[in-house]
Image (cartoon, rainbow, N blue to C red):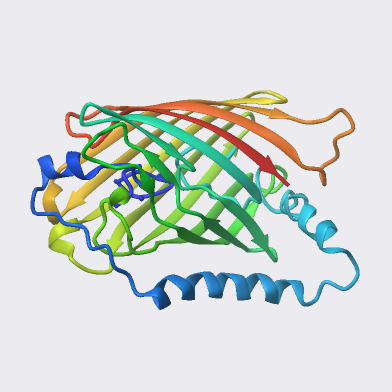
Amino acid sequence: MIRFRRKIPFLRQNCSHLCVESLAKTAPSLTIDSTVKPLNSILPWAAAFALVCSSLAGWAQQSFYQQIRLHNVSMADVQPTWMTPLFQSDARLGQALRISVSNSTMAGNHVLEYGNGHGISMIIGRRIQVDLNPPSFFRNHSSSAPDGFGNASTQVKYRIVSGNAEHGNFAVSAVLYHAFAPRIHQNVLETSYYAPYINVGKGIGRFAIISSVGGFLPTGKINLQGRAVEWNTTAQFHTTAHTWFDIENETAFFHAGPFDGKTQSFITPAAYVSIRRKSWKPEHAYLVLAAGKQVAMTRFSLWNHNVVTEMRVTF
């Protein structure tokens, strides 16, 4: 996600589905470099894998499955229990598999994105979360923009400080997101990029406010891609034991590149339902079904009416 959505910069949080045809109308000078050094693609995944393996070395008393399923339980002692937003990066650590589909309007075309930039999130120790996100598949519904896969990405989140409901009900974390260089046109990127974030959140009874600020930082070709500062805020209400509602605001401020000086802002109302078996215990897995619609609030927007449906397996 340049990601034209959240949980990464201005070109969508979670790789963007902006097609070449639509970008050509806005910035005709942008071309796509279809090459990438294999080593640059392999190293971040190898580093993440090594980090996971190193955390398993000391597990001698319990099985792998027992250790994995207790990660979220152990976090309940040190952080709040609100719901992770659809787009915005959460201030807490969490462990889940996210299966997501988005359907939005781009330059008069409907673009379906299967995967939506999400994958699997794993908690390592007490302070680190690692995300591995496989490429999303884009169905462009356009004769000039063939269907295909987008970019793989990774994310590392570090819990700086937090407290559960009895100890402040808040969380502060730092995130470094990395998207690999594009091999095909689906994400309309010239190079790989990084997106650092600071996330904060505060719970007050059934309410929670979550906010993040960060940026889109390409590794090169700034004149063709530009940079962006992104500020996201979510207001959430825990309505019943199994339901949550929230409203997210995602705003990006563009600098340099083809969209220099422009601002893009969205409002996303969303709902969440958790499904648990009757004999459920905190160490057991459960499902979360979520849906929301992202609507542009500014005249300038690279997409609009983005309907997202998602299933999470929290384990």
Residue at 58%, 43% (x, y): give it.
Answer: 98
Closer-to-camera residue (263/200): 263
Q: Position of residue 113 (x, y in %)?
A: 42, 38
Asked whether residue 85 appears in the rendered view, the answer is no
Residue 218: name its quadrant.
bottom left
Please identify the residue farthest to the top as the structure is shown.
Answer: 239
Q: Is residue 188 left or right of residue 53?
A: left
Classify 97 as above or below 154. above
How many tags in the picture?
0
Residue 112: name its quadrant.
top left
Classify 108 as above or below 18. above
Residue at 35%, 75% (x, y): give it.
Answer: 37
Q: Position of residue 123 (x, y in %)?
A: 66, 59
Q: Position of residue 60 (x, y in %)?
A: 88, 73
Classify 217 as above or below 96. below
Closer-to-camera residue (210/152): 152
Classify 255 as above or below 21. below
Closer-to-camera residue (38/300): 38
Asked whether residue 50 appears in the rendered view, the answer is yes
Residue at 53%, 47% (x, y): give it.
Answer: 90
Q: Is residue 289 left or right of residue 315?
A: left
Q: Is residue 126 left or right of residue 226?
A: right
Residue 139: name its quadrant.
top left
Q: Position of residue 159 (x, y in %)?
A: 58, 60
